[in-house]
Each structure stands twice: as C-alpha cells, then as structure tokens.
Amino acid sequence: MPKQPNEISRRQVLIAGAVLTAAPGFALSQTKENTKRMEPKLVRVPDANDIAKAIAGTEKVGIHAKTHEEHLKLWQGYANKTNEIRKALAEMDTDPAKANQIYSQMRALKANYAFAYGGYLNHNVYFETLGGAGGPATGEVATLINEAYGSFEKWAADWKATGIAGRGWAFLAYDHEEGRVHNYIGDAQDTFPAWNNTLILAMDVYEHAYYLDFTTARAKYIDAYMQVIDWNAVNARLKKARG
Ligand SMILES: [Fe+2]
C-alpha cells in the first residue's frame, strides 16, 4: 500500500520516543550546569588619575576640581555596583522557575545592571572626553557632524538643547547601521539609547556635574563644558568604533 504524505513511519516514532526519553536527562544536566559558579570579569574602579585631565582642563571655564572629586565618588560607585552585580549574577540560581517579571532576583539584578554598568560606561566617556581644547569639532567626527547636522553650529545648538531637555545625559553616538552620528537624549544611562550605536561623547547634565559651580544654571554649565571638549579623544573613540 503506498505511503500517505502525512503518515508517520515506525522509524520516526522510534526517533521521537528517543528524544522524549532523553529530554528529562538533558533538563537535569542543564540545571546542574546552571548552578555551577563562574568567575566574573570585573571592571576597573576609577581613581584620582582618571579625573586629572578634567581637573587640569576645566578650571579655566569654571568647572572646578571639587566638582570632579565629588563626581569621582559617584563614578566609583557605579564601578563597584557593576562588580557587585556581576558577582551576584555569577553565583545566582538561574532556574527559570524562580524568574518572575514582577519581582525576582533575576529581574532585580538584570534591570539594575543596565543602570550600574551604563553609569560606569557613561562616566568613562564623560571624563575621557573632558579637559580638551573645545571649540568646533575636528577630524573625522567634524565630517560626520556636518553630514548629519549641516554645520558644527547647528550640531552645537542641538547638543545644548538636548542637554537641557534631558534629565541626566546627552549622548553623541556613531550609528553603525547608517554610518552617521546622532545626538541622543538620556534621562539616565538606561534610557533611550539605540542598539548598534557606539557612544563617542557623553555630557553629564545631572546636577552633581555642575551644581557646585553653577548652582541650577545648567545652560551656563553646558556653555562651559563645550569649551573644554577633547575632540582628539572623541575622534579616537570614533576610530575605534569604526574599526
Ligand atoms: Fe555623573
């Protein structure tokens, strides 16, 4: 009798049975694997050397050493919490039955990881690109800014407005999808970035970045900040991003 297209052969039934038999064992071994502890990779905690360029380069525009020294403590806090969460993730029980979208250890660690590590990375870029000659952008980033915004002046207006409209950050990122730069707004480090973008300039507009020097006058802080952007450092980040 000819075989029908949807008829299951005896061989197929045996294979399916073998898979079903193997499944519980696989799940068990995976659970054992999940409980193994991994050694987490930790980030370097920044120190006084990491704010030296900012201190030397921003005094002249009214952003003083005390601001950066206090800021360093917050940056260190992000680094320490990043490491703490990495250790906790490495040690936690990843049994999916214990995960929960309302509250669970997995949710708490993963959600706060974006805040901790994001804050660490943002401050890395902020301090790396601060304390320079400022003025109009130079090099490759100047070309990309002109392509995206028409001129440096138009970009600068957008950047300042983005910094005033944001609750915590303004981000200049290189978009690998389109090969262009874009000013992103950030209420915090874990809000509003887009995938496949590399951060090349980050302006901290939380009050801790300027209150000691400008009280609540954020626009004055941004004007001062823009006089001390290190465009060489921005170009170095861009070059690394483009590979
Ligand atoms: Fe900050």
Image: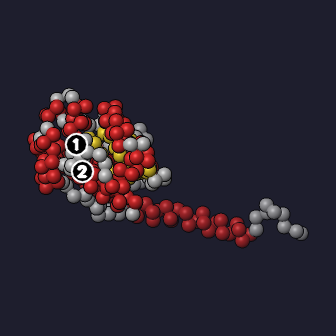
The front one of 113 and 8 is: 113
Q: Where is residue 125 in the image (x, y as percent from the top left)?
A: 27, 50
Three-letter residue code for mark 1: Gln
Q: Which residue is drawn at 39% across and 51% down?
A: 143
Check the image and report above or below for 135 versus 88: above
Q: Where is residue 104 in the image (x, y as percent from the top left)?
A: 37, 44
Q: Which residue is drawn at 35% across and 52% down?
A: 141
Q: Is residue 137 visible?
A: yes
Q: Position of residue 137 (x, y in %)?
A: 31, 48
Residue linked to disc 2: 230
The front one of 162 and 140 is: 140
The crowd level at tag 2 (other Cα within 10 Å; few <14, some 14-19, many 20+) is: many
Q: Residue at x 71, y 68 (%)?
A: 12
Q: Can residue 103 be seen in this view?
A: no
The front one of 208 and 149 is: 149
Give the quarter of the figure containing the N terminus: bottom right
Give the quarter of the figure containing the C terminus: bottom left
Farthest residue in the left direction?
A: 66
Three-letter residue code for mark 2: Asp
Q: Is residue 92 left or right of residue 17?
A: left
Residue 115 has which mark? Answer: none
